[in-house]
Amino acid sequence: MSSLREGPTTVVRREDYAPPAYWIDTVELTFDLDPAKTRVLNRMTLRRNAAVAAQPLRLDGEELNLARVLVNGAGCSFKMDAGQLVLDNLPEGNEPFTLEIFTTCAPEKNSQLMGLYVSQGTFFTQCEAEGFRRITYFLDRPDVMASYTVTLRADKARYPVLLSNGNLEEEGPLPDGRHFAKWVDPHRKPSYLFALVAGNLVAREQRIVSRSGKEHLLQVFVRRGDMDKTEHAMQSLIASVAWDEARFGLPLDLERFMIVATSDFNMGAMENKGLNIFNTKYVLANSATATDTDFANIESVVGHEYFHNWTGNRVTCRDWFQLSLKEGLTVFRDQEFSMDLCAEPSARAVKRIEDVRVLRTAQFPEDAGPMAHPVRPDSYVEINNFYTVTVYEKGAEVVRMMQTLVGREGFARGMKLYFERHDGQAVTCDDFAQAIADANPDSALARQLEVFKRWYSQAGTPRVRAEGRYDAEARRYTLTLSQHCAPTPGQAVKQPFLIPVALGLLDAQGRELPLPESQRLVVLADASATVVFDDIDSEPVPSLLRGFSAPVVLEYADSDAQLLTLLAHDSDPFNRWEAGQRLALRRALAAVRADGPVAQPLDAAFIDAMRAVLRHDTLDAAFKELTLTLPSETYISEQLEVVDPQRVHAVREAMREQLAQALHADWAWAYEQHRDNGAYRPDPLSAGRRALAGMALTMLCLDARQSGDAVWPGKAYQRFKDAGNMTDRFNALSALVVSGHALAREALPRFHAMFRDEALVLDKWFALQAGAPDRGGNILPAVRQLMAHPDFQLRNPNRARSVIFSYCNANPGAFHRADAAGYVFWSDRVLEIDRFNPQVAARLARALDRWKKLAEPYRSAAREAIARVAAQAELSNDVREVVTRALSED
Ligand code: TRP
Ligand code: ZN
């Protein structure tokens, strides 16, 4: 039984932060690696922190077998208290002393994938946030930074490659077929950035010369058969190094930079100093096995982890409440990286739309639900539960607003000051905001820094109401903006936020009206503000919150005519897309709220507008695909007070079918226009063409389902067989599965047979079926069958996610069943997974966060399922925190 279960449930509070009583200056670790019993010798030099009252040394440890403790080479007394190793007879005074600790652990039994574990015969570590304590006793907190020397010893035949952070200092043979490698990390670091890897791996290598003329070795380590899927990750890494130097003047500070892929990983990837460890999903790709989305994700995750080298590693977090200091900033940096790699401005806009879509479909619900927390949380039970879309995605928006307020150059200046002040330190979100403000003393950010920082302290999504009034006689347009934020758990009253509102005005013909710079960015810092625009000849159409300049909900009673003007003409591509979404959302909500059976929710004006976008001769394909994609069921549901998930599903499906039918000829045209793209390249332009062709094929198959036509499903099946790349192949398969065509029953086994040895492709195969539209309750039984498939492995997080999360978290129409069977399935899986991997279980546990919004009978059934999980006596702190919050009355 894991010690997580035995420990008391304690709340950690930000206000209780106290500096450590001791510093650890150096750490020498020696590992004798063995899957069943690994020996760890940890030799540290420590000294008291003179700024703190003298007190015993308390070291964190978890699931360790303690063999011996020596202080300055001699035995000493110690005790165990609440899982910590406590030493209270340490030498007096402030002189450094050495502490040696011998422990053993059992990596092959480590199913949580935190600490040292074995995946397919290879050793890996994962230490963030609190995994290092599962390797040895330590001050496992990010403000204790030490210099590490690591010696690895293992059987040479089974573990020919031995890696750790920094530079390889020495390697050689040992008796009994064993060998060793000694690594020295030249940079001090917190324990969460420690890593080791030992196994039978091969590497793609590339030498690069940085701007300053320094040589570096880049390596991507994978299992032997995966070498042909490493080129894209390597190219992404090379581009990342170049980008950080060019955009922020931040060089690679290591001789060697390594990426290693593992198929057993709780999250996406981890930025261990010089030795990033990745989920295979974010490394391995070639055109036969990976889709355009996979290629794009790899680029951004490789960038993300690399950029942590400065934002996270060189400057790290003082405590885990400051997590967004590194994560929000690094997400912002990876978003900018992906945008800067786009050759065309339209591709930049597409990336921005995709990022906003994630924020609004995942973070806004979090902010409105029981797990709502500020970007810088005030308390937690289990820190793993706070690696959230709020800390990451909303945190990135907070950084983005700073850049908007001080300008791109001002922001780069702020970053420079941040590193001048804090390189090598463990700091806070306040320190970051202060540096950006101090580098831009004349900015609105500097003038109102305290107001701005409420974005860090207050949870919840502000709503901005806009009202426009046109006075024809005075040729004056008056815009009034006001803000409001609903209470969140533990925060009843909200102060006004500082909200940058980028805007423009169009005339009735859709022409942009010239505005002075100061009026194109309005900074709302109080409850309300009024802006006056003079010399306006006719009633304008406002284009508000351009580029999604703040993470808020905009309430503006725009007419359909105004939205159609924006959709047709706005120079801001984000708002152009947004106008289409608002038009669609309005129709979806009307149909959901109407009485009686779902009829045809779409009108001719909307359909014509969509046709105009689809047939447009200058808009690019990726933008068209985004605009023609209807708001998700999750997003529609968020706008409702009370949600009947079946009704929402039925309405959205009806809208899709209507678009499929009404635009049949246009979809056929779009498919023929975009289906051929020459040799595969994962660039945004050709990816956009493939996305639109794929969407067209799905719509044509959907329509064929209604009309009984066999031609398009036949073409889709042919495409599935002939496709030259995974994107086209998978889109064709998906068109058949999503439309529920009989040919799907032939294509699915064929696809499985083709890719039976490609784990990441099989994940797609599972996910497609578990995420397919429900028809008469058929998905849950299909999910149960998938779990019985010989390739299903509950303990592999990617595989578990591909079936269980695809069903519970990403398929609302199938999950929310009137008979409650979806919820019972969910509670069974949460409890089952929690027994071996609490981190993954707690993520699944969040699928019912928004249960209070559900209509009956869903609401009561969901509550009962959550209560059933909460009633379980043996529950991890991870899952307990999630279900306790979900059930709280707050
Ligand atoms: N710091 C990592 C990132 O954002 C993510 C991470 C945190 C993680 N904790 C983890 C990854 C645990 C795997 C397991 O890049
Ligand atoms: Zn990160």
Image: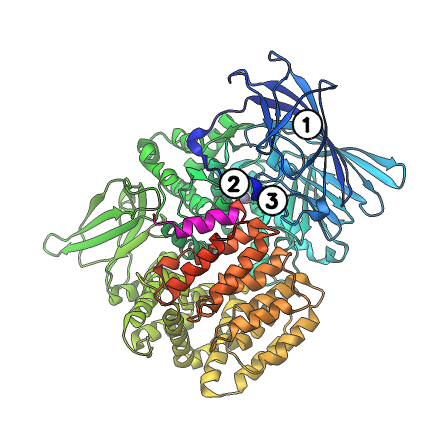
Question: What number of labels is visible?
Answer: 3
The residue at 70%/48% (across/down) is 109
Q: Earlier along the polypeptide chain: callout 3 or callout 2?
A: 2
- Which mark, residue 27? 1
- Which mark, residue 270? 3
Verify whether residue 887 appears in magenta.
yes
Q: Can you tell which of label 3 and label 2 is closer to the viewer?
A: 3
x%, y% of residue 127?
62, 40
Instruction: Report the amino acid beneath label 2.
Output: Arg
- Report if the CB atoms under discs 1 and 3 are less than 8 Å apart: no
311 and 674: which is toward the camera: 311
Residue 296 seen in the current view: no
x%, y% of residue 813?
44, 69
Residue bearing the label numbered 2: 247
Q: Main secondary structure of the magenta part?
A: helix
Q: Is mark 3 within 8 Å of ligand 1?
A: yes
- The residue furthest right is 176
Report crowding for label 1: few under 14, some 14 to 19, many 20 or more residues within 10 A (C-alpha): many
Which residues, given as a range, are shown in magenta?
878-889
Q: Secondary structure at mark 3?
A: strand
